[in-house]
Amino acid sequence: MSAIRILVADDNDDILGFLMFVLSDAGYDVRTVRTGSEIVPALRRHRPSVVLMDMQLGDMDGLDATRAIKSDPTTSHTAVIVYSAHAQQSDHDAARTAGCDAYLVKPSPIDHIIGTIESLHHRRDARQRRADA
């Protein structure tokens, strides 16, 4: 079985490096981008199951990036996890309205991040199997 592909988007190099290291070490195939405008092209190239992204991406916020992901037929199936320091319920609600599949507050324990990735990946696979049947 091949590794689950993940795209991590964050404009903070320390967080990006940490997530790349930890998730790669856990067996995931991880790609990274630093800006919101890089997300959809990277999704088209690498076709990950999950994108894990910050809300603040320099050139675009996570809500706009999510809307771009979910409105593009080639990327709309990708699970979106917001990983942000914004912890207000209104932030969570706005993310859900934009189409995010999960919202994690920084810092989250790595096992919680991995559990969320696994859950969303398996849900996506189950939907795909039903669609293919």
Image: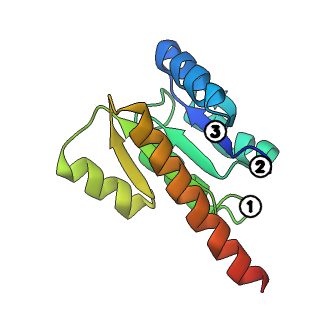
Which residue lies under the disc numbered 1?
A: 74
Quick check: 71 above or below 111?
below
Camera-nearest label, 3 or 1? 3
Position of residue 74 in the picture relative to residue 55 (left or right): right
Q: Return the residue found at the far bottom.
A: 133
At numbered mark 2, what does the secondary structure look like: helix, strand or loop? helix
Q: Mark 1 and mark 2 in contact? Answer it, CB < 8 Å.
A: yes
Camera-nearest label, 3 or 2? 3
Mark 1–mark 2 Cα distance, whole angstroms, equals 7 Å
Q: Mark 3 and mark 2 in contact? Answer it, CB < 8 Å.
A: no
Point out which mark residue 7 bears: 3
Mark 1 Cα-neighbour bin, 10 Å: few <14, some 14–19, many ≥20: few
Q: Earlier in the sequence, mark 3 or mark 1?
A: 3
Would you say residue 64 is visible in this rendering? no
Q: Amino acid at mark 2?
A: Arg
Q: Amino acid at mark 3?
A: Leu
Which residue is rendered at x = 61% and y = 32% of the image? 26
Which residue lies under the disc numbered 2?
A: 44
Residue 95, image x and y in percent?
A: 36, 54
Would you say residue 20 is visible in this rendering? yes
Which residue is rendered at x = 68% and y = 58% of the image? 75
Mark 2 Cα-neighbour bin, 10 Å: few <14, some 14–19, many ≥20: few
Q: Amino acid at mark 1?
A: Thr
Numbered marks: total: 3
Residue 49, image x and y in percent?
A: 66, 53
